[in-house]
Amino acid sequence: MSAVEPAYSLCFRCRRRRFDRTQARARDAAVIGFPHACGSPIARVGQTDRLFVKYFPIFIDLRGKPVLLVGEGERAARKARLLVRAGASLTIVAALPLSDQLTKLADKARIEIIARSFSPDDVAGKVLVYSATGNSEIDEAVANAARAANVPVNVVDRPDLSTFVTPSIVDRGPLTIAISTGGAAPVLARLVRERIEGQMPAGLAQATAFAERHRALVKERVGTERLRRRIWEGFFEQVLADTLHAADDRRLQELLNVTIRSVERGDGAASGAVYLVGAGPGSPDLLTVRALRLMQQADVIIYDHLVSPEVLDRARREAEWIAVEEPQGCHARSQDELNAIMAQRAHAGQIVVRLKGGDCLPCRCVCGELTYLRARGIRVEVVPGVTASLA
């Protein structure tokens, strides 16, 4: 690769990292040799640790699926409780007598107990394997057997032997939140879980089940996916604010009806709008609460090169991303072009967030954008950001 070719910090077109205008200095600054799915180059050498994650977060349906647990103590009991609750068909292999908790659980649930030492043949036909013996020799044997059979394995407190990890879980019926540090700091994951649980309304499980029962009705009544998303956003915002009535089905029905009528009339958040948002000096911790909420609700996000990758990571991934700078860095989009894009998307009923680095108020183009959009009857709001001088 030539030393004068441009360097990238993740795919520019996919907005995951912004375009780096500096030239690649030498071969050690070369772009990785494989393109992103969209055709753009990906990260420079030295930045790949920010491109990949160690574990891919995923939820697995274990109802009726065969799962193997090797171990007999309290750690095995904790894993067994989670697996039984998930509906797994659990087999426990234990050479020593089971702990009291595991014995009580086995009496209540349909668990197959095999009282002998672990054998590599035990992993055959299993969809997941857990080892919670605390014995390094046995744990390594279980991990090796599972890997040889291409079965995902988790060894408790041994991320080096595991091909997957079990996260800390916040369980509110159909709503499940998983928190993981990839095995690096389990205590931190537990503390984060406790904080989340303390802030979640007790009736959120019932509200989630209510939404599940009414999804088909809302889909039949409201034709477009964008408007249905607005309905559920508005509904759950009210549920989170109205914690005392979140578990009341009659109240939930009233909230849903009000939200649907608002969307059908085109009121409030259901209609198109443009928000000129200051993204702050670069740290996501300096985003205002209002800015973060709008970034999560946006249908379209227009951003410039001053907006940091860390800030962009906090925004809604399903949104349409439009960069002010062209992908190859040849030129920036003109202000007229940006105005036209914002007006077109807003007239189509979409929420447009125009992200500007720092505080957008001192920016001269903001006045022009406000005038242009208001002259066309578009709802527009300026959301100031934190300036670098204050940060």
Image (cartoon, rainbow, N blue to C red):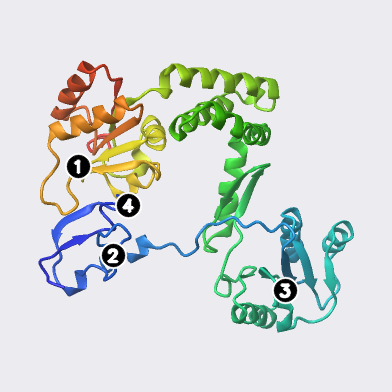
Residue 164 visible in this rendered orientation of the protein: yes
Give residue 365's mark.
none
Tags 1 and 2 touching, CB below 8 Å: no
Tags 2 and 3 touching, CB below 8 Å: no
Residue 72 visible in this rendered orientation of the protein: no
Q: Measure how far apart labels 4 and 1 are at the Cα level.
A: 14 Å
Q: Answer with the quarter of the image where residue 268 lies.
A: top left
Amino acid under label 1?
A: Val
Residue mark closest to the camera, 4 vs 2: 2
Within-10-Å neighbours for mark 1: few <14, some 14–19, many 20+: many
Residue mark closest to the camera, 1 vs 3: 1
Q: Position of residue 145 (x, y in %)?
A: 65, 81
Q: Position of residue 183 (x, y in %)?
A: 55, 64
Label 1 secondary element: loop
Amino acid under label 3?
A: Thr
Give residue 16's mark.
4
Q: Position of residue 131 (x, y in %)?
A: 69, 72
Amino acid under label 2?
A: Pro
Q: Please say if 89 is above or below 196.
A: below
Q: Which residue is mark 3?
A: 133
Tags 4 and 3 touching, CB below 8 Å: no
Give residue 35's mark.
2
Residue drawn at x 16%, y 34% is 337
Label 4 secondary element: loop
Q: Answer with the quarter of the image where residue 90 lies.
A: bottom right
Within-10-Å neighbours for mark 2: few <14, some 14–19, many 20+: few
Residue drawn at x 22%, y 22% is 373
Q: Please say if 120 is above or below 39.
A: below
Precedes in sequence: disc 4 or disc 2: 4
Give residue 324's mark.
1
Within-10-Å neighbours for mark 4: few <14, some 14–19, many 20+: some
Residue mark closest to the camera, 1 vs 2: 2
